[in-house]
């Protein structure tokens, strides 16, 4: 089977102190992309690597006759709908691909729009407001502390200690930072202080892989209890042991919470018409009620030889699925979808 592997690659290290470097945080290191290609080849696939840049369409068109399936690991490069770009090209070229359609890809990237659809489907989402300008009036239902995030980014881009705001002044400053740096609206949300989980789903209909808890109680002093750039790129880099305490998989949760989390995931999958795979981030409020924060598709799939804490492969391993089996499972679920 011949697979075109479509990816984006990072050109700058994501320094939490350099706003411009944050623009590429959701891309992968060259080392990761190489390791993914190696793994795919070892699965027995014939792999054509294609960077998802401006030349991608021509390369896909030229190779169309040779490609059985595209493994879509792209995020696109420009604009708020960039996750949709490659799937849209593939629809046009009629080349089958892994993962959801352009509409779903654009939606999951846009946290504000995804949230509206989830809410309309009765799924718990945090109370939020979209800021297009920094001087908009804060709606009365939103009470401090709040969190300010870029509307259409992933991998904690724009999420730092300063994202959790305690008052009007901090709110305005952070909204301005997000709008100026990312040239997109800022999403302001109720800050949920409870437990956080990340949940991988695979297949159609999806199987739920072991739930990961991101344990914020082990966060060092001086850092906010969120999955911020500082935690990912400073704390984890400086203290390799930290990761072992930070991620618990399978999460230790009671049956009742487990059922609630799984229900939220399955409803989210259906409401957004996800296909093949995604990872859903959920956080609870003080009382333990869970809310959907973020849907990731494609989710990070860093092979264990590069990182042992990439959520999706880590959870798969806990279910006894090694990295190559995981790649094969993703490919198989796409193949089954196109052939049934
Ligand atoms: N409303 C919220 N309440 C509490 N923590 C949040 C909230 N939104 C985001 N976070 C924290 O910030 C992290 C990144 O936010 P998320 O919405 O998942 O964006 P990304 O696409 O960057 O992963 C989350 O994993 C969580 O720790
Ligand atoms: Mg997230």
Image: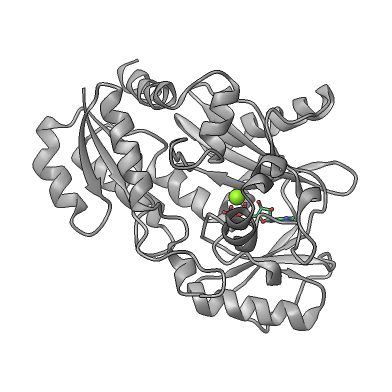
Can you say which quadrant of the picture contains the N terminus?
top left
Residue 198 in the image, given as x and y percentages of width and height: 64, 39
State the residue at coordinates (84%, 68%): 144
Q: Position of residue 82 (x, y in %)?
A: 38, 57
Task: Name the image quarter holding the C terminus.
Answer: top left
Residue 335 left/right relative to 202: left
Is residue 270 among the parts visible in the rendering? Answer: no
Figure check: 103 above or below 201: below
Q: How many marks?
A: 0
Say whether residue 6 is left or right of residue 221.
left
Regarding residue 167, the answer to whether it shows in the image is yes
Q: Is residue 261 left or right of residue 99?
A: right
Question: Where is residue 190 shown, x and y percent of the image?
Answer: 78, 60
For image coordinates 13% across by 37% down, the residue present is: 64
Name the residue at the right extreme.
287
As displayed, is residue 52 above or below residue 234? above
Relative depth, front residue between 58 and 32: 32
Colouring used for the render:
one colour
Q: Quadrant of ligand 1?
A: bottom right
Residue 278 rendering spot, x and y as whole percentages: 52, 36
* Closer to the camera in the image, 228 or 68: 228
Res 163 → quadrant: bottom right
Q: Is residue 20 above or below residue 3?
A: below
């Amino acid at each position: 089977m011949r697979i075109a592997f479509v990816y984006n690659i990072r050109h700058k290290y994501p320094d939490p102190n350099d706003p411009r470097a944050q623009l590429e945080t959701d891309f992968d290191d060259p080392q990761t992309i190489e390791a993914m290609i190696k793994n795919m080849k070892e699965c027995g696939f014939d792999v054509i690597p294609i960077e998802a840049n401006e030349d991608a369409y021509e390369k896909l068109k030229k190779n169309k006759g040779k490609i059985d399936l595209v493994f879509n690991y792209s995020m696109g490069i420009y604009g708020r709908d960039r996750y949709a770009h490659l799937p849209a090209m593939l629809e046009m070229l009629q080349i089958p691909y892994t993962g959801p359609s352009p509409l779903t890809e654009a939606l999951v990237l846009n946290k504000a729009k995804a949230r509206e659809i989830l809410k309309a489907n009765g799924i718990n989402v945090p109370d939020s407001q979209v800021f297009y300008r920094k001087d908009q009036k804060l709606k009365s239902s939103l009470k401090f502390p709040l969190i300010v995030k870029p509307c259409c980014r992933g991998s904690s881009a724009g999420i730092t200690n300063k994202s959790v705001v305690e008052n009007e002044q901090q709110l305005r400053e952070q909204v301005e930072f997000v709008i100026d740096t990312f040239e997109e609206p800022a999403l302001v949300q109720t800050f949920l202080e409870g437990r956080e989980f990340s949940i991988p789903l695979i297949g159609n209909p999806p199987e739920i892989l072991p739930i990961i808890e991101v344990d914020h109680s082990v966060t060092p002093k001086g850092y906010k209890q969120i999955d911020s750039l500082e935690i990912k790129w400073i704390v984890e880099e400086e203290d390799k042991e930290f990761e072992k305490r930070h991620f618990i998989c399978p999460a230790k949760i009671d049956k009742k919470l487990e059922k609630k989390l799984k229900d939220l995931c399955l409803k989210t999958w259906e409401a957004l018409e996800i296909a093949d795979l995604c990872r859903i981030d959920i956080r609870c409020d003080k009382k333990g009620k869970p809310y959907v924060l973020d849907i990731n598709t494609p989710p990070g799939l860093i092979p264990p030889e590069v990182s042992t804490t990439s959520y999706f492969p880590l959870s798969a391993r806990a279910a006894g699925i090694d990295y190559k089996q995981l790649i094969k499972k993703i490919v198989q679920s796409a193949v089954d979808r196109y052939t049934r």
